[in-house]
């Protein structure tokens, strides 16, 4: 559709779970060499994370790994940042709706995340449960586990008795019901829809 609309498409396949620093360098190089002006993340949370990482780094002239991930700085106000859009094909992390980006330095066995400011929020995210239905059953189950763990991270993060805890409890209950239905019938649109909504 994009090509029919006259757009030039540069593909960067092979984004792995827990995208690596080496892959990030590759993406930045591809974007720079091809003067990319938009990134469309088509995949799951790792692809969304990776795309935000590339978008933040393309126009940074120094060591973006050190600056953003190790030192935790935000891109300067005047720095250009590529816009990112997401088309989700796997529910799990919620990365399609935030500025977070986790990258793994495989050489040093080190994984770290950075939550970028609102400039790295996806400009749009398309969440169509039907796009998740070709994911293998085991991968769907891994996504369900991921969703629950991301909820747990927030739920157990402090001792406050607050509204977000009760929302999290509702999400966990919904996830249990929807995951059982989706495992029984992976083509159950309502179950897949609720898994996606819960993750987001």
Image (cartoon, rainbow, N blue to C red):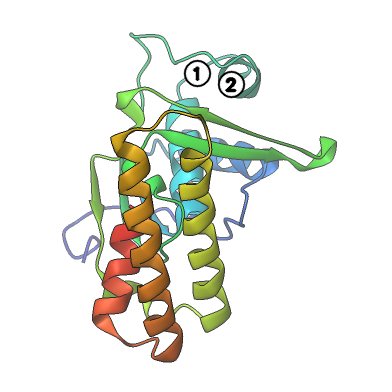
Q: Nearer the viewer, residue 130 or 123?
A: 130
Which residue is the extreme one toward the right? Answer: 108
The residue at 50%/27% (across/down) is 57
- 168 lies left or right of 64: left
The image shows residue 108, relative to residue 71, as above or below, that is below
Which residue is the extreme one toward the left? Answer: 5
Question: Which mark's residue is nearer the viewer, 2 or 1?
Answer: 2
**Secondary structure of the residue carrying numbered label 2:** helix
The residue at 63%/50% (across/down) is 18
**Secondary structure of the residue carrying numbered label 1:** loop
The residue at 23%/60% (across/down) is 2
Q: Where is residue 140 in the image (x, y as percent from the top left)?
A: 49, 74
The image shows residue 155, relative to residue 82, as above or below, that is below
- 5 lies left or right of 72: left
Mark 2: few, some, or many residues within 10 Å (few <14, many ≥20)? many
The quarter of the picture where residue 4 lies is bottom left
The quarter of the picture where residue 55 lies is top left
Residue 123 visible: yes
Which residue is tagged 1?
60
Which residue is the extreme one toward the front? Answer: 161
Q: Nearer the viewer, residue 142 or 83?
A: 142
Which residue is tagged 2?
64
Question: Do the numbered discs 2 and 1 sit on residues whose CB atoms are within 8 Å?
Answer: yes
The residue at 29%/37% (across/down) is 163
Residue 33 visible: no
Q: Where is residue 197 in the image (x, y as percent from the top left)?
A: 28, 60
- Image quarter (top left, top right, bottom left or bottom right) of the N terminus: bottom left
Q: Which of 112 and 176 is in front in this view?
A: 176
The image shows residue 16, relative to residue 180, as above or below, that is above
Q: Where is residue 127 in the image (x, y as percent from the top left)?
A: 26, 61
């Amino acid at each position: 559709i994009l090509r029919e609309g006259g757009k030039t498409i540069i593909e960067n396949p092979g984004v792995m779970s827990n995208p690596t620093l080496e892959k990030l360098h590759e993406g930045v190089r591809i974007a720079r060499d091809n003067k990319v002006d938009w990134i469309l993340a088509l995949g799951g949370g790792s692809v969304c994370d990776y795309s935000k990482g590339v978008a933040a780094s393309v126009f940074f002239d120094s060591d973006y790994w050190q600056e953003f991930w190790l030192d935790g700085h935000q891109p300067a106000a005047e720095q250009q940042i590529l816009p990112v859009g997401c088309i989700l094909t796997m529910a799990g992390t919620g990365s399609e709706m935030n500025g977070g980006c986790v990258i793994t330095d495989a050489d040093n066995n080190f994984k770290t995340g950075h939550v970028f400011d609102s400039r790295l929020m996806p400009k749009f995210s398309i969440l169509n449960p039907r796009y998740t239905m070709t994911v293998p059953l085991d991968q769907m189950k891994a996504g369900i586990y991921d969703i629950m763990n991301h909820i747990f991270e927030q739920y157990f993060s402090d001792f406050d008795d607050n509204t977000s805890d009760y929302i999290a409890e509702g999400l966990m209950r919904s996830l249990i019901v929807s995951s059982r239905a989706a495992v029984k019938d992976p083509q159950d649109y309502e179950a897949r829809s609720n898994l996606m909504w819960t993750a987001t």
